[in-house]
Image (cartoon, rainbow, N blue to C red):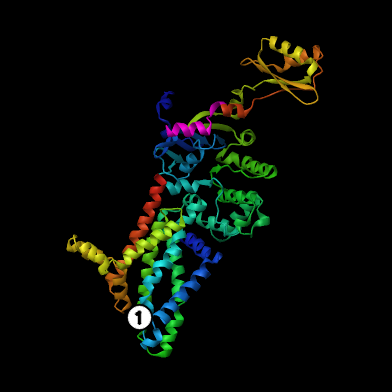
């Protein structure tokens, strides 16, 4: 465990050593605000809750999280620091976890900086703050899921653009796997258990369940196990590249 | 009784405390291309092994496998008795590694970077600071300690990589072209540092600078197409050169023909080569028959015959002769790989 900390710290400070962190946070907050107020008609709805706000999170993460995850490994490979990092006496899983946690914490900070909208809704009415808290928890877990997918994909290439595009596509499939568009495609030929399995991978379904205020252990386990799965894929992909 | 040891395979003999790196049958294939084709080497404490070979001969690939960055296709590497494939962390703790091109995080300053390395290597607080200070002192990084690494000159970047490698005072030091891109002064100080560290460590240095081998290495290993083609002291290698014990003399062109005929007639001389120099001077090089020493005889004749010699010297040998004779041209290799 003590090995994770230096890796985490280096990765986390790297965000703030370049304009990346500030640009990302500004765009993140601006996009969140724009969608909530202008497209989601937050004021006009006249409802004291943040469901409109949270409703846009999966779609924003779809592009913003791969923008963070694309550099996670691809940049190390491209600049040659991968060789340095992997010859330091740190177990590979600890390096993978340290870098992942740094990126997740960074996204968490960006998410926490949306707090003015929480203040706004409390000033305007009396929302159920428990539901809002659940929404934030769900959003953070979902971001972690997207990030793990993006990290695994980033470890397979040294090209950040490829990492970004492939991550967006894979994240998109996970987001909409519960939607009729996807399910109809399978319904024609796949047996029911397969269809149920595919629809259960939907980020949207699980996120909507949590953000409606019902923190079901199964939804949490979903995001958690998906993250663990993709971080394991991340470790395996790096190991495979070692042996190639 | 005494012959018992001879029957024991090399691998089980590592109780010899001085053997620090053992490489057995190390092989790496990338698809159809064999980059490293069965290398066997042991490196002991106190040795500075110069790894020589043309670009693409497999030097870097071998080093990447020794340090655990690449997994071998077959064969194994042990560092201080730890198998790099199965006990990677224990082996990596014993190794200081300067990868090719000295990669470092460009957005960090050398101080931040070295503190990061110290933390990963398990040093905390004062101990970490002391380690960083020692490494910085040895590599003369003080003036740039707080500038982002990406803004540093090539020489400083290389030394940041070097500082990172020696920070934990490792028993095994592996450096891929440590003096590449350094000016002669910087090269000299890096070589002095390597020599100073060598008694307590096993060091592998890859290079294609032949003078570096002569300057710092106690042993030279030449690899070509993934195989070891020569292994010996730099002096051993020089003995294989056709210039070994060759005698060169410079004299006015009017005497050249006489001198040339005279030299050719000596039994110790195998052949004579002639190069025209400026100012009406001629350079003659007499190559000896194997094992013969020429310098005394040649100088005696030159004095006796009053050749008006301007320069006269014998050579220990030229490493680039040996290098060219032992290794293949990169275009030839590429053609063979394709075939």
Q: Name the residue nearer the viewer: A63 or B289.
A: A63
Q: Is residue B228 left or right of residue A204?
A: right
Instruction: Give coordinates of residue B15: x percent, y percent.
Output: 45, 36
Query: Badge 1, how many Cα within 10 Å: few under 14, some, many 20+?
Result: some
- Identify the residue position indicated by label 1 in the image: A51
Count of numbered tags = 1
In front: A37, or B157?
A: A37
Q: Is residue A30 above or below residue A93?
A: below
Please tell me whether the stretch drawn in magenta is mainly helix, strand or loop. helix
Which residue is depicted at the point 43% across and 27% down? B5
Q: Position of residue B163 (x, y in %)?
A: 59, 50
Quadrant position of residue B197: top right
Q: Pointer 1 indicates a residue of which chain?
A: A
Q: At 36% from the left edge and 52% from the top edge, which residue is drawn?
A: A236
Residue farthest toward the left in the current orientation of the protein? A191
Whether residue B221 can be seen here: yes
Give SS at disc 1: helix
User: Visible in this render: residue A148?
Assistant: no
Classify residue A193 as left or right of residue A220. left
Q: Is residue B78 left or right of residue A189?
A: right
Residue B125, how many percent across, how many down?
56, 61
Where is B54 relative to A198, above or below? above
Magenta stretch: includes residue B326: yes
Q: Quadrant of the C terminus of chain B?
A: top left
Specify start and end residues of the magenta stretch as a single range.
B325-339
**Is B177 contained in the magenta span?**
no
In this picture, is A115 found above or below B78?
A: below
Give how far across and how far down residue B157 sits, in percent. Answer: 61, 51
Work out which quarter of the rendered image holds the N terminus of chain B and state it: top left
């Amino acid at each position: 465990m003590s090995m994770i900390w230096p890796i985490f710290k280096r990765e986390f400070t790297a965000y703030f050593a370049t304009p990346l962190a500030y640009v990302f946070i500004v765009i993140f907050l601006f996009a969140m605000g724009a969608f909530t107020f202008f497209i989601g008609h937050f004021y006009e709805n006249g409802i004291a809750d943040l469901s409109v706000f949270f409703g846009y999170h999966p779609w924003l993460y779809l592009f913003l999280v791969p923008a963070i995850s694309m550099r996670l490994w691809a940049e190390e490979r491209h600049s040659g620091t991968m060789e340095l990092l992997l010859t330091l006496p740190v177990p590979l899983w600890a390096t993978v976890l340290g870098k992942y946690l740094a990126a997740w914490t960074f996204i968490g900070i960006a998410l926490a900086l949306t707090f003015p909208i929480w203040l706004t809704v409390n000033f305007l009415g009396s929302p159920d703050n428990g539901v809002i808290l659940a929404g934030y928890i769900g959003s953070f877990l979902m971001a972690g899921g997207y990030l793990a997918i993006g990290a695994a994909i980033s470890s397979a290439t040294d090209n950040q653009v490829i990492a970004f595009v492939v991550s967006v596509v894979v994240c998109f499939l996970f987001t909409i796997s519960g939607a009729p568009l996807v399910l109809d495609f399978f319904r024609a030929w796949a047996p029911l258990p397969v269809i149920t399995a595919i629809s259960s991978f939907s980020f949207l379904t699980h996120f909507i369940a949590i953000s409606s205020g019902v923190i079901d252990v199964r939804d949490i386990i979903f995001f958690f196990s998906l993250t663990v799965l993709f971080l394991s894929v991340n470790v395996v992909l790096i190991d495979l590249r070692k042996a190639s | 009784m005494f012959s018992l040891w001879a029957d024991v395979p090399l691998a089980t003999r590592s109780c010899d405390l001085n053997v620090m790196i053992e490489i057995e049958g190390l092989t790496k294939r990338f698809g159809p291309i064999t980059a490293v084709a069965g290398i066997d080497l042991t490196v002991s404490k106190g040795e500075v092994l110069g790894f020589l070979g043309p670009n693409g001969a497999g030097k870097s690939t071998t080093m990447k496998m020794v340090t655990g960055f690449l997994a071998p296709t077959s064969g194994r590497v042990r560092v201080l008795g730890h198998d790099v494939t199965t006990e990677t962390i224990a082996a990596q703790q014993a190794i200081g590694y300067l990868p090719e091109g000295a990669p470092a995080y460009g957005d960090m300053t050398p101080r931040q970077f070295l503190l990061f390395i110290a933390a990963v290597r398990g040093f905390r607080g004062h101990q970490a600071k002391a380690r960083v200070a020692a490494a910085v002192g040895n590599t003369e990084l003080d003036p740039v300690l707080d500038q982002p690494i990406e803004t540093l000159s090539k020489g400083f970047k290389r030394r940041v990589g070097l500082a990172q490698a020696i920070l934990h005072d490792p028993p095994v030091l592996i450096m891929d072209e440590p003096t590449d891109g350094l000016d002669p002064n910087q090269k000299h100080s890096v070589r002095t540092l390597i020599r100073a560290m060598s008694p307590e460590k096993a060091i592998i240095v890859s290079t294609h600078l032949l003078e570096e081998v002569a300057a710092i290495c106690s042993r030279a290993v030449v690899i070509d197409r993934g195989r070891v083609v020569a292994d010996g002291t730099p002096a051993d290698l020089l003995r294989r050169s056709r210039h070994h014990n060759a005698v060169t003399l410079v004299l006015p062109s009017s005497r050249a023909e006489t001198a040339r005929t005279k030299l050719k007639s000596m039994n110790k001389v195998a052949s004579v080569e002639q190069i025209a120099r400026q100012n009406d001077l001629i350079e003659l090089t007499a190559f000896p028959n194997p094992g013969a020493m020429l310098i005394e005889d040649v100088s005696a004749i030159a004095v006796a015959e009053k050749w008006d010699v301007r320069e006269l010297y014998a050579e220990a040998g030229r490493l680039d002769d040996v290098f060219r004779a032992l290794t293949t041209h990169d275009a030839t290799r590429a053609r063979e790989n394709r075939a």
